[in-house]
Amino acid sequence: MATKYYYADASGDDSGSSEANAYTDFETALEGIAAGDILYCKKSASRPDFGLIEVDMAAQSDTATTIVEGYDSTPGDGVRWQGNGRLDLNSGGNIIFKNLDIESSRAGYLVEVNSNNTYWYNCKFYQTRTVAAEEAVRLNFHSHFVNCYFDTDSAASTSRGTVFIGSNDGGSFYGCVIRGD
């Protein structure tokens, strides 16, 4: 089990080995960790645009939980890392995401979960697309959300809602705010 770092503004060797040498690409960081690793995502001065990424994380382990956690000055400070883009989580499992803030205007959705046993704590998903309302989160495998915020910023209606749960599994929501249809 290793501790890795992602920081878009880092200027080191891009190995993820420390905050100074952090990965500077979000997709590379997510795909560069193994089951059981911790990836700390440092908040940048401005919201980095990570585009549309389809992430194939390490294979799921039933004995090791992978953690992806945002922070500002010190890991564990509870501050959300902020990013702009669309994340397709396509593999892996037993992953905990903490303190992430994804805000964007993307067609379809901001986050799609195709991964078993994902847990989200203190995360924010804000779909700002106003042409036609799109989902903030699309679940195709079971996920659990605690103290998360979901929003679609549009007066237009969406047939799938702010959070869309596909037919494969479900989701559980504790202490969350869901705004929109």
Image (cartoon, helix red, strand yellow):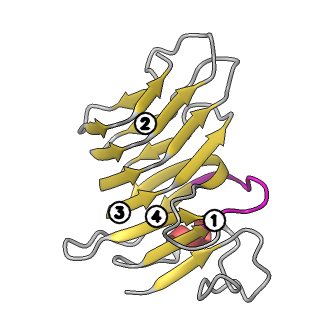
Disc 2 element: strand
Q: Is residue 131 magenta?
A: no
Numbered mark located on residue 175 in the image: none
Camera-near label (4 vs 1) is: 1
Reading the image, the residue beneath label 4 is 56
The CA span between labels 2 and 4 is: 17 Å
Q: Do the residues labelled 3 and 4 touch (CB within 8 Å)?
A: no
The answer to which of 55 and 26 lies nearer the viewer is 26
Q: Position of residue 57 (x, y in %)?
A: 44, 67
Q: Do the residues labelled 4 and 1 touch (CB within 8 Å)?
A: no
Q: Position of residue 35 (x, y in %)?
A: 35, 76
- Three-letter amino acid code at disc 1? Asp
Reading the image, the residue beneath label 1 is 72
| Residue at image location 35% in from the left, 64% down from the top | 92
The CA span between labels 3 and 4 is: 12 Å
Mark nearer the N terminus (2 vs 3) = 3
Mark nearer the N terminus (4 vs 1) = 4
Q: Do the residues labelled 2 and 1 touch (CB within 8 Å)?
A: no
Numbered mark located on residue 138 in the image: 2
The CA span between labels 2 and 1 is: 27 Å
Badge 2 density bin: few <14, some 14–19, many ≥20, Cα 10 Å: many
Disc 3 element: strand
